[in-house]
Image (cartoon, rainbow, N blue to C red):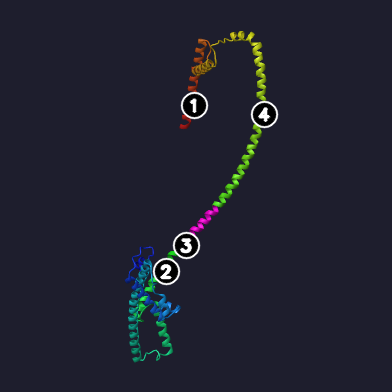
Amino acid sequence: MDHAAEHLDPTAPAPASSSAAVAEVNAWLASLSAEAGSGGGPVGRCGGGGGAAAELSLGPDPTPRGVAYLRALAAASQARSRAAGIAAAGLRAQASEYRAEAARLRETLERSGLARDALPPPAAAAARAVAAVANLLAIRDTEMSSFVVVSADLSLRRAEVEEKRDKVHKESKALLDYTRKAINKLTELKKMLEKFKNDVEKQQGEQMTDWQTKLVMMDSKERQYILQVSNYKVTSMFYDSYVETICPFVGHAMLNRVGYTPEINHGVLMEMAEHKKDLERKTKPIADTLRSYQDLPPDKALAALAIEDKKRQYAAAEKYLEDVLQSALTTTGL
């Protein structure tokens, strides 16, 4: 079929026209006309007779491409006709064999008294039912073994179908559970989203209120700072005028009295403050030690008397402690 299709390609280069090719095509067209005239083809049904044969002949001046196309079409048609003839012969042979087999079976049934006409109506109905089942199951005979084989095949198919059905049922059940879980999760997510929206709106409202309050406070602070800046500017102007008028007369005397020199600047003052903190840190332990000696008398003799007094008090306390322990031991022994 593919080979014929290649020959039927009208875009392929056409070979040169020859009398043999034209004669072959005319013969093929004549055979088609004969088949149509006999009423066996569709052309005979449309027009019919010898008029169709005249219409299916090549003209006096055929083109090479048209001759090549019709020759390829004729080859394909003849090949299909031969294949159909072979298949038809085989089918006719099989039909004759089936008819012979049917005649032999019919003769056998008639001899045994089981002909179709001789069977009672229930038996005929049962035979027709068996034949119908055989045709339905696509078996060629009604042997018990054939029915058993088909029944086994049906059982296997049924088992496969049940297995597939169980598998599909399990998959559908799993999918249903998954869908329910997904729906529940979606519901929870929707609730969380709604809650977040409410929280965000509430938080935004609180933030806006807080920002408005702070904005009002900052506005008042801004006005206060602007007023303070204006006051500082006025004060600075008065101070500058004061310095320009009075400080030249009293400034140098005051600075000389407090020991200010031109070498003292901000950096020097910071270094002196750091040095002061270092000295305070170093002298703190000494001050704490001296503070513990403040209870002693200033005179050496009085200090010695105070030390002796403390020693006597310490000895009396030790003696009192020994007496208490001795009395406790005596009481425990009794």
Image-quadrant location for residue 120: bottom left
Above or below, 168 against 182 in this view is below
Q: Earlier in the sequence, mark 4 or mark 3?
A: 3
The residue wearing badge 3 is 173
Q: Position of residue 249 (x, y in %)?
A: 64, 8
In the image, what residue type sits under mark 2?
A: Glu
Q: Nearer the viewer, residue 138 or 238?
A: 138
In the image, what residue type sits under mark 4?
A: Arg
The residue wearing badge 4 is 223
Q: Earlier in the sequence, mark 3 or mark 2?
A: 2
For discs 4 and 3, the disc positioned in front in the rendered view: 4
Report the residue at 33% width, 71% height from top: 19
Q: CA distance from mark 1 to mark 3?
A: 93 Å
Q: Nearer the viewer, residue 269 or 2?
A: 2
Image-quadrant location for residue 265: top right
Image-quadrant location for residue 234: top right
Q: Position of residue 123 (x, y in %)?
A: 41, 87
The residue wearing badge 2 is 162
Task: Count residues near mark 4 (Cα–Cα under 10 Å), then give few for <14, some for 14-19, many for 20+.
Answer: few
Q: CA distance from mark 3 to mark 2?
A: 16 Å
In the image, what residue type sits under mark 1?
A: Val
Q: Which residues are magenta?
A: 173-188
Q: Position of residue 12 (x, y in %)?
A: 36, 63
Q: Earlier in the sequence, mark 4 or mark 2?
A: 2
Q: CA distance from mark 4 to mark 3?
A: 73 Å
